[in-house]
């Protein structure tokens, strides 16, 4: 049984870890390099740490969050306020947040969803997302990048089906492509396992448990698809097929994540970017986040003095590509496993909205520990 103190530290770790991954990762976003030398990441991290030492708040630099955190904040706020999922409310929060601060670096397609949501007064909050990309839905990682509060909210139930249902709905407000939904699920399962984990991190058993959950999900979706396809043949124009995304794609890539995390010597960032991906597609970025968390539990050259949370963020960024989103997802998992105590104070001081993340974590913990 986990103590209350440990659990709250893990809740806080997850949300703060996500914010820091986003803020620090976004320093490199837009470079779109296949890899970024660890030394280069360390140089920026040194800067983040030295800014934190400045006592005068006026000239202390604060690294700002991007759309990843903006959207995760709405997920947290809506779940807390409504004590559960209210799709219209959450959709409205996403959209209003975007129109209030459109400069946060949102994906090119998702903006259409926010506009349509607003124009339709949120009447059918799932419709605009379903219409994206000719009815295929977005395969971007925008669902996965913001999902961490859902894992915290559903923690008490301890039932993968409850978490799956919640994540599916939260994701489908903007992303309906199966690979975006399943990517968000993979991320949410990883955070859930990390919240429940303790002691030494065992790469193999973590991957096996993750794979078991993903396989169950993907097999059940494949069955549903088969049924749907049968019906479509009878009514060719009635139902649109979403895609030809391979049905066990995530189940299979977890084998690759495991191999990369156990490989000796450590694969280069270029190799990870080829084998797992580091771009804006969920399928080509959530695996890199899980990998970063797992690999950071091992020794990494040039990161000897850093703890596993710090190593997770630095390694995730060094992979290149969509650095803020990969680092936010990796940071959420690492923060959930290692807890708030492992997250450097200096990083917390130098990044925007950490206080809010702490408040949301406390509220979500309360929901989990109340008797209602
Ligand atoms: N067909 C063709 N292109 C697609 C499809 C599709 N089905 N789905 C996505 N794209 P979007 P996100 C391409 O707008 O997932 C930010 O930096 C298309 O070019 O849904 O919310 C975030 O922080 C589209 O514009 O965004 C994330 O890191 C793009 O993928 C990242 O962007 C993004 O999809 C993705 O955010
Ligand atoms: Mg981003």
Image (cartoon, helix red, strand yellow):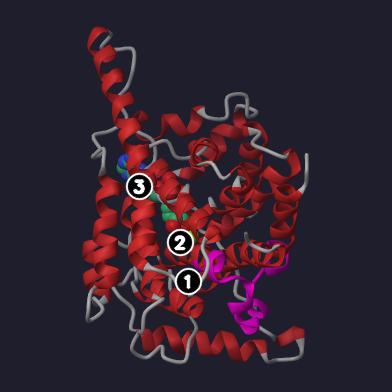
Q: Secondary structure at mark 1?
A: helix
Bounds of the magenta span? 334-357
Where does residue 356 sit, x and y in percent of width and height? 72, 62
Q: Quadrant of residue 148?
A: bottom right
| Beta carbon of the mark 2 residue lies under 8 A of ligand 1 | yes
Q: Quadrant of residue 288?
A: bottom left
Q: Is residue 111 visible?
A: yes
Task: Please name the residue that numbered disc 3 is placed on.
Answer: 212
Q: Position of residue 280 (x, y in %)?
A: 37, 55
Question: How would you rate the neighbour count of disc 1 (Cα within 10 Å): few for under 14, some for 14-19, many for 20 or more?
Answer: many
Percent x, y of residue 224 = 33, 24
| Residue 57, image quadrant | bottom right
Q: Earlier in the sequence, mark 1 or mark 3?
A: 1
Q: First in sequence: mark 2 or mark 1?
A: 1
Total numbered labels: 3
**Circles 2, 3 touching at the beta carbon (< 8 Å):** no
Which quarter of the image is occupied by the C terminus?
A: top right
């Amino acid at each position: 049984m986990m103590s209350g103190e440990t659990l709250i530290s893990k809740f806080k770790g997850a949300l703060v870890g996500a914010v820091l991954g986003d803020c620090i990762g976004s320093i490199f976003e837009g470079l779109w390099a296949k890899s970024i030398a660890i030394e280069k990441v360390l140089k920026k991290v040194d800067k983040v740490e030295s800014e934190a030492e400045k006592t005068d708040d006026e000239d202390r630099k604060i690294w700002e969050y991007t759309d990843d955190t903006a959207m995760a904040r709405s997920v947290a706020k809506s779940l807390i306020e409504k004590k559960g999922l209210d799709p219209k409310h959450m959709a409205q929060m996403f959209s209003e947040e975007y129109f209030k601060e459109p400069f946060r670096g949102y994906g090119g397609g998702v903006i259409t969803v926010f506009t349509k949501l607003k124009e339709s007064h949120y009447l059918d909050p799932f419709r605009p997302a379903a219409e994206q990309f000719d009815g295929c839905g977005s395969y971007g990682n925008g669902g996965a990048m913001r999902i961490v509060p859902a894992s915290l909210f559903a923690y008490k139930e301890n039932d993968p089906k409850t978490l799956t249902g919640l994540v599916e709905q939260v994701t489908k407000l903007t992303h309906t492509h199966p690979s975006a939904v399943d990517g968000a699920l993979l991320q949410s399962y990883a955070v859930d396992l990390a919240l429940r984990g303790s002691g030494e991190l065992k790469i193999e058993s973590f991957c096996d448990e993750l794979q078991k959950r993903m396989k169950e999900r993907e097999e059940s979706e494949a069955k549903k698809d088969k049924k749907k396809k049968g019906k479509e043949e009878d009514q060719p124009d009635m139902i649109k097929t979403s895609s030809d995304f391979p049905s066990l794609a995530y189940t299979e890539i977890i084998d690759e994540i495991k191999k990369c995390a156990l490989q000796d010597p450590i694969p280069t960032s270029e190799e990870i970017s080829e084998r797992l991906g580091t771009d804006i597609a969920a399928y080509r970025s959530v695996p890199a986040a899980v990998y970063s968390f797992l690999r950071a539990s091992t020794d990494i050259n040039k990161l000897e003095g850093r703890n596993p949370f710090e190593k997770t963020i630095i390694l995730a960024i060094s992979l290149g590509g969509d650095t803020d989103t990969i680092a936010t997802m990796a940071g959420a998992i690492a923060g959930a496993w290692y807890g708030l105590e492992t997250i450097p104070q200096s990083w917390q001081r130098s990044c925007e909205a950490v206080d809010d993340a702490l408040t949301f974590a406390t509220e979500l913990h309360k929901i989990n520990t109340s008797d209602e």
